[in-house]
Image (cartoon, rainbow, N blue to C red):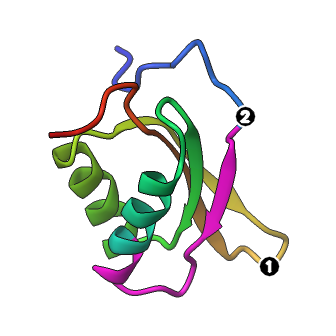
Amino acid sequence: MNSTSKIENLQSPDAQLDLRGTPCPINFVRTKLRLEQMAPGSVLEVWLDAGEPIEQVPDSLKMEGYQILETQLVTSDDNSGFFAMKVQRPEQEIA
């Protein structure tokens, strides 16, 4: 039983946004503003902390019409981790 779907067209992001240490809802607002500056169809990789950020930001973006392509846990040598989430701006403008 596979509960996570694998996206085949994993593309490298067009831009990256490090929001580690940024509280909610500021991290969502910054992500949305950055996406609005990007061309339609562009992919933004956002780095988010565990807990509330990774729980709230993807859901909020989906409600705004953005597509979450991939979310991946990244761990470093000191066992601190963060999530790298790739989100795509829609080809058409969001109403």
Start-end of magenta stretch: 13-27
Q: Amino acid at mark 2?
A: Ser
Residue 4 image point, x, y percent: 40, 26
Residue 56 image point, x, y percent: 26, 64
Q: Is 64 or 49 nearer to us in this picture? A: 64
Upstream in sequence: badge 1 or badge 2: 2
Q: Secondary structure at mark 2?
A: loop
Give the left or right position of residue 93, taking residue 95 as reference.
right
Magenta stretch holds residue 60: no
Residue beneath the point at 34% across and 14% down: 1
Up-down relation of residue 69 to residue 86 (above or below): above
- What residue would you read off at disc 2? 12
Q: Specify the label residue 58 is tagged with.
A: none
Q: Specify the label residue 78 is tagged with.
A: 1
Disc 1/disc 2 C-alpha distance (Å) = 26 Å
Q: Is 2 or 17 nearer to us in this picture? A: 17
Up-down relation of residue 73 to residue 41 (above or below): below
Residue 36 image point, x, y percent: 42, 54
Residue 95 image point, x, y percent: 14, 40
Name the dominant secondary structure of the magenta segment. Answer: loop
Residue beneath the point at 53% across and 87% down: 21
Q: Secondary structure at mark 1?
A: loop
